[in-house]
Structure formats: C-alpha cells, structure tokens
Amino acid sequence: MCGITAISTKKEALPFLLQGLEKLEYRGYDSAGVTILSQNQLKTIKTKGRLKDLKEALSHQVLKGQVGIGHTRWATHGIPSNLNSHPHTNEDETISIVHNGIIENYRELKNFLLEKGYHFHSETDSEVVVHLLDYYYKGDILKALQIVLTKLVGSYALCVVTTNHPDEVVITKKDSPIVIGKSDSGTYGASDIPALLEYTKEVYFLNDHDIAVLHPDHVDFYDCDLKPIEKELVNIPYDHEAAQKDGYDTFMLKEIHEQPHVIKETLRGRISQDQVVLDELAEIDFSPFNKAYFVACGTAYHACLSGANIFERMTKIPVICQVASEFRYNDPAIDEHTLCLFVSQSGETADTLAALRLAKKQQATTIAVANVLGSTISREADYTIYTCAGPEIAVASTKAYTTQLVVLMLLGMYAAQRLDKKVDLYHDLIQNLMKLPELVENVLQDEPLFAIYAEYLKEAHDAYFIGRSLDYASVLEGALKLKEVSYVHADAYIAGELKHGPIALIEKGSVLFAVASQPHIAAKTISNIQETIARGANVILFTLKGMEINNAAETYILPDIHPLLQSIIVAIPLQLIAYYTACLKGCDVDKPRNLAKSVTVE
C-alpha cells in the first residue's frame, strides 16, 4: 500500500516522480504529493484524490529542481485530506519526508514532541518522523536519522530531503519495500520496480535498516551503525513495455491473456525426462520433515490451499494451510523438523514476512514462492522458487495466481521425487503440464461465453460459489475475484456444507457458480447443485464431459486434463466472469476501491 518515488538527478526531478507514481497506482491510494528541492528551498504540493488532481495543482506552479520525493497515500491514520497527504515537512521547511508503513508508537512520540513545543498539522503517524528528524538534527542528517530509527516501533520505508544537503535523498527501510535504481542521468528510489523501468533496469536492493544516500551520479550505502557497505547492482530482466497495457483496455485483461505465456515460462527448464528439476531446492533433505505449514494471504492463500492438498497427497507429509495474519498468533508448533512455505506475489506482504521470521526463529526450514526478484521474502527465506509471471500491475491477481499454482504443483512432485515416493501418475502429470499453456489458450478463446455468464450478475448484489476438494480452493478464489473488482457480495462454500446452513440463502433467481472438476467427487457436487436448482437458483456449472445436467442455466465443459491441474484451468473463466461483471457495473477494474496491490502493513 502507498507508493514512494525519489530522485537525485542532473535533469529535472518532477517527470520521474510523477511517472513513477503513475506506475505505482496499482498499490492503492487516496491522495498524492511531491516535494522538490529548488534553489535551496523545499516546495511541496499535495492533494487529496487521484494523480490527476495533483497534476492539476502542479499546473498552477513552477516546480523546477533536480532533487525530490513523491508519494501516493492510502489512508491508515487520519482521513484522506490535503493535510494528511505526504510529503510532511518540518516547521521551518528545511526537512521533508515521505513514509510507507506504520509507526506503532507514534502517540508516545507525538506527546514527546508536543512537550518540546512542536506543532502538528496532520492526523498521521508519519508526521512524527519529520519532527523527530528536526529535533535530533545537529548538522548531520545521517546521524539524526540513525537516532530517529532507534525511536521508531513499526514498519517504514522512508525518504528524506533537506535543504542542508541539497543534492541528496536519504532512504531507509524496515518491513516495507523500496528499491534503488541508477543510470547515467541520476539515482532513484521507488516502492517497486515498475516505477524505475522507464529510467533504468540497474537496481540495488536494501536490507532492513540499511541506509542509502542518492547523489546525482552515485549511491552511498551504510549499515545501521553508519559504516559504509557495498551493494551489488542487479539487472532487472523486465522491460518498460511489459508494464504497459499493450492494446488491452485494462491491465487486468492483459494479464489474464498473458497466462499461457507466463505458465510456459514458469515451466521452462523445470521438467526434464519425466523428472521435476528445482535446483533451487537441491540442498533440502525432505526426509526429516514430520509436518509442513503453507502460509499466505488473499489470493496466494487460495493457491496454498490447492498446493497443500497436492503436497500432502504426493509426499504423505501432513500439511497445515494457514492465513499469514493468523499464523503467528496461533502459537504454531514449529521446530527443526517443520517445513514452512510462504507464498507472496510481491514478496513484501507484511503478515507473510512476519510469519516467515517467526518460522526461522523457531528453526524451521523455509521456502518462499515469490514473483519479484530480490523481494524481502525471497532474500530472507532459506530457499526461493520464483514464479515467472512478470510485472503484475492490476490490483486483482490473475497470472501470479496461476503461476503460483504451477510452482506448487512442481514443488509437490519434486518433494515426492526426492522422498522416492512411487507416484504412478508422474508421467501422466508431466505430459499434462506440458499441454497446460495450450489448453489455457484454448479456454481464453471462449472469452465471449464468459462475458455472457457475467450478464447473470448485471443486476445482482449477491453470488454463491460451491465446490469440493481442490474445487473448493478454486471457488474461494473465484468469489474473491468477483468481490475485488465488481463489488458483488460473493460467498464460497464447500458443496457438502450447503445443507448445514448456506442453502437457506438460495432463492429464486440466486446466481450460483459451481465447479465439479474432480472425477472422484464430481457426482456428489452435482447432487448438491440439483438441490440449489430445485430452489430456483441460476447455476453456471463448470464440469467434465459426461457430467452435464439439463437444468443448469449454463454449462461449460472443462478441457480434458489431469484433475490435479483443473484448478489452473478453471481459474481462467472465473477471472473473466469477475472482469466482465466489473465492466458491466462500471467499476475501475485495475484499481478497485479500498484495495492495494501489496499489503505492506498488518
């Protein structure tokens, strides 16, 4: 949540700051602002609303300068307003900061500063930081920052500019993402890589408590004791065009259509002669593990539900799947015989990071599944498997989800392989995996059908989803997608639980999406579907050939593929139904209200 840009350059700072904030809109925000250091003065413009409102405000100003910081804020402390927007500046306008994260002890710090005579103009937790910097500044901004960081409890990505160091931006982080870029024209900071790609692909990654100082021609790095440290410059293999819409109306639709390609890329090099190849995990001995935890949030959690089911079936290692925000508060039983897997598209999800750190503290072996090279989760986990989804800009995850499912399937097979489990279905599964990109492409050709299915929801306020076994994880994700982008209230249930309460909600005209893709249990799901039809529901059924029922409103026959891979296939129509429902209802598909791409606070 929230977006940061920062620059020290030989050219004008404002164009980079604004284009970077545009690239970070997917993170969610309700206000925006910039500070430019110009002629040894800080000039700050900020406003409630969208970036277009900030640009309108800037059109009435002359804001020239080569050093600056920018921010898009998603309200946590204080309502969306001009005063609560970032950047925040000290009383004599010599220091300005932007902050992502949450300062948990801001009330105590604020009371301390009030006693010292400081005045506050916002309701935010972030404003305490700039006043603390002012209080401790004695001619050395790095020393002042070092002291301030010892006072802060919580999470932060911080950028600081000051008139006393006119060509510098000072940047640091803890539990909140920021990446540093460098080109011949300047040095840059941003919350995520897409904000940098138009200017550079050469980046540095900060560890927690590291400090970076941007200069026009170089970056200095320090540890928390202000001792100089070296950082490796990494080339990012994304191009600028990958973060553009490429002719599609929305990023979400573009990313849905990229799934055949990214699935193929995720499989590339990971299958050889009926064997799964995951060299990233070659050092792991799976035999000591007596249990595993699969941990994630939101869409990634739904991927974990599928992955945990498959991993347990293949390895016979018991798996507990938990939401990350619950995991560390449930006193999980973890030791050196526990495998813990953490899945996050961004690799920066705060709750998932906290869960990872708890697992490491208790001596578990940790594996991360992430999409972003160099993300915090990928650096802190013992081992990392990358999905190959490329930049995902739309807030609602689509291609990241299906590539997570692919990676978790490969993980289950690889662990079973290493444990010498005699998995009879290996050859069949691998052959089906290789067909997967083509089959997903074929399903995408039926997009007009899914747009028709969305028409059932045009006037609806509620929808229901049912499935069993792996299909339950699929309908949970389908319901979440619908809620995220169309704001239609949607509930997903295990089909066998309908008569334990939920069927009371079904009435004439109710819209129900049912998935029955698992042959060993599909007939039971079909029986549950008949019960809803008898009560007047319009059922849209996704099932296998030979399992059709005459009285469903719509039936889509899923392609012939191994049952363990059907969750990847059925994700496509459910994504498109959510997309077209949102379009019918006039919603902003790429930037749903109240949501952020990367949830970097608890």
Image: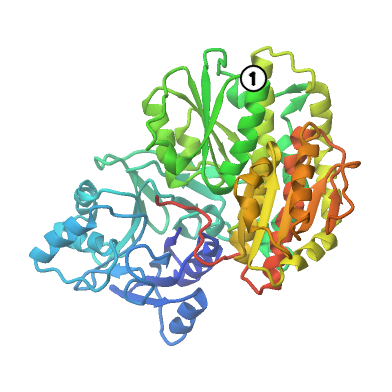
Quick check: 124 left or right of 292?
left
The one nearer the camera, 394 or 478, is: 478
| SS category of the residue bearing label 1 | helix
Question: Looking at the picture, does residue 438 appear above or below residue 310?
Answer: below
Question: Looking at the picture, does residue 8 appear above or below residue 514?
Answer: below
Q: What is the basis of the colouring in this image?
A: rainbow
The one nearer the camera, 238 or 348, is: 348
**x and y, in percent, of residue 120 in the image:** 20, 71
**x and y, in percent, of residue 474 in the image:** 68, 45
The one nearer the camera, 378 or 490, is: 490
| Rendered residue at 61%/70% (across/down) | 588
Query: In the rendered image, which quarter is residue 125 located in?
Result: bottom left
Residue 403 visible to the viewer = no
Quick check: 99 left or right of 107?
right
Question: Looking at the picture, does residue 376 appear above or below residue 16?
Answer: above
Question: Looking at the picture, does residue 27 appear above or below residue 49?
Answer: above
Q: How many marks?
A: 1
**x and y, in percent, of residue 423 in the image:** 75, 17
Q: Disc 1 marks which residue?
A: 315
**x and y, in percent, of residue 270 in the image:** 72, 29
Residue 500 visible to the viewer = yes
Query: In the rendered image, which quarter is residue 267 located in?
Result: top right
For mark 1, does the 10 Å Cα neighbourhood hold few (<14), some (14 to 19), or many (20 or more) residues? many
Quick check: 565 left or right of 191?
right
The one nearer the camera, 212 or 565, is: 565
Q: Amino acid at mark 1?
A: Thr
Quick check: 421 left or right of 60?
right
Question: Among all residues in the image, which is located at the extreme bottom?
Answer: 60
| Rendered residue at 84%/63% (across/down) | 448
Query: In the rendered image, which quarter is residue 275 located in?
Result: top right
